Structures are given as C-alpha cells and as structure tokens.
Amino acid sequence: MAPIRTALLTAALLSAATPAMAFELRSPDFTANTPIPERNVFAGFGCTGGNQSPTLSWSEPPAGTRSLAATVYDPDAPTGSGWWHWVVFNLPVQTRALPAGAGDPAKPALPAGAVQSRTDFGGPGYGGPCPPQGDTPHRYIVTVHALKVESLPLPADASGAMVGFNLNAATIAKATLTARYGR
C-alpha cells in the first residue's frame, strides 16, 4: 500500500509544481492591438513612414529549442494569401532580442548566421505596414518561433510562404504580438 501512496503523493506534487514561464514577445514600439508608429510604417506605395523594423525582445524559449525565427505577417492584405513583411530565420538559440532597424539588410544588426529572406515586397529585409487607403486597419502579427532544428535548410531568397511552411513543421512554440495599422 505504501508504494501506491508514495506514487499518488509524487503525482500530486508534480501536478502542483509551478508551471514553466510562458514564452512571451514584447516591443517598446507597440503593444497588443495598438497602432504601429510611423517610424515602423513602410516608405513607399503612398506611405511615408520610417520603414524601421521594431525593437523586439522575448523571454526564454522552451526546452528543446535549437534556433529561432521572427516574422511579421499581415493576414488582412487584399491578396488572397496575406503579406509577408519580414522573414528572419536561423537566429541562434541564445538570441533574446532584435534592435530597432535590425531588418535593414544594408546594416549588420542581426546575429551571425541569421538569414533575412525575401518578403512580399520582393527582397530581403523589413518592409513596414502600408495597407490600401480606406481599408479597415490591418493586423500585423509579429511572431518569434522557437524551432526544434538548428537551422532551416533554405536559400536566402526563399519566399515567405516557403519559410512559413518550414516554420510550421519545425516550431515547438510561438510568442506573438499583434498590432494594427490603417490609413
């Protein structure tokens, strides 16, 4: 009888243990469901923003994470398939932040080994929001993916959809922040 009692007590103690901290994404530029500031808005297509990628930071990813990726995606773009604004993969597992402007491919602000892939603007790097004038504000989903692989075996010019497909296969956890922008 004592072994059963010990097993039950152990199970009860384990279930009452403090849960692991949540994998969370933060930005000093915007919070959930708030407007994206002009410094992060695209410069073109009728928009006159600063086209600066936002500052991002995140908490410790879950156990088993071997690399990270960051994306910015607009599911409300009138394309039938959304719009990839930023695609970064093969971030080293110890990365916990990306500084403002890290999405500028002309400036070496990303960690060694990270790849900025092709966005729906046609090239690598961050391209900020610029929805059609008069549309209801679009959602911009900023996500950091904790991946179970050390790297994604993709070329630097892989499309956002191709990277997204591979991310979905390799993601063990996501930290997401959704902001809005309209004009």
Image (cartoon, rainbow, N blue to C red):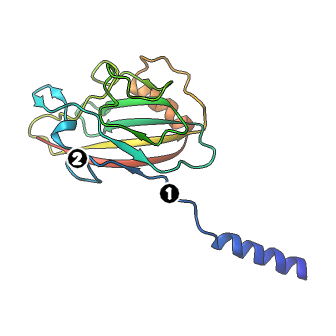
Neighbourhood count class around disc 2 (C-alpha, 10 Å): few under 14, some 14–19, many 20 upward: many
In this orientation, which residue lies closer to the viewer: 152 or 61? 61
* Label 2 vs label 1, nearer the camera: 1
Residue 124 found in image quarter: top left
At 33% from the left edge and 22% from the top edge, which residue is drawn?
A: 107
Q: Which residue is mark 1?
A: 22
Neighbourhood count class around disc 1 (C-alpha, 10 Å): few under 14, some 14–19, many 20 upward: few
Q: Which residue is mark 2?
A: 180
Cα separation, mark 2 vs mark 1, equals: 23 Å
Residue 64 found in image quarter: top right
Q: Give the amino acid at mark 1.
A: Ala
Which part of the image, by quadrant, shows the C terminus?
A: top left
Residue 57 as seen in the image, left or right of residue 65 = left
Above or below residue 22? Residue 153 is: above
User: N-terminal of the two: label 2 or label 1?
Assistant: 1
Residue 49 as seen in the image, left or right of residue 87 = left
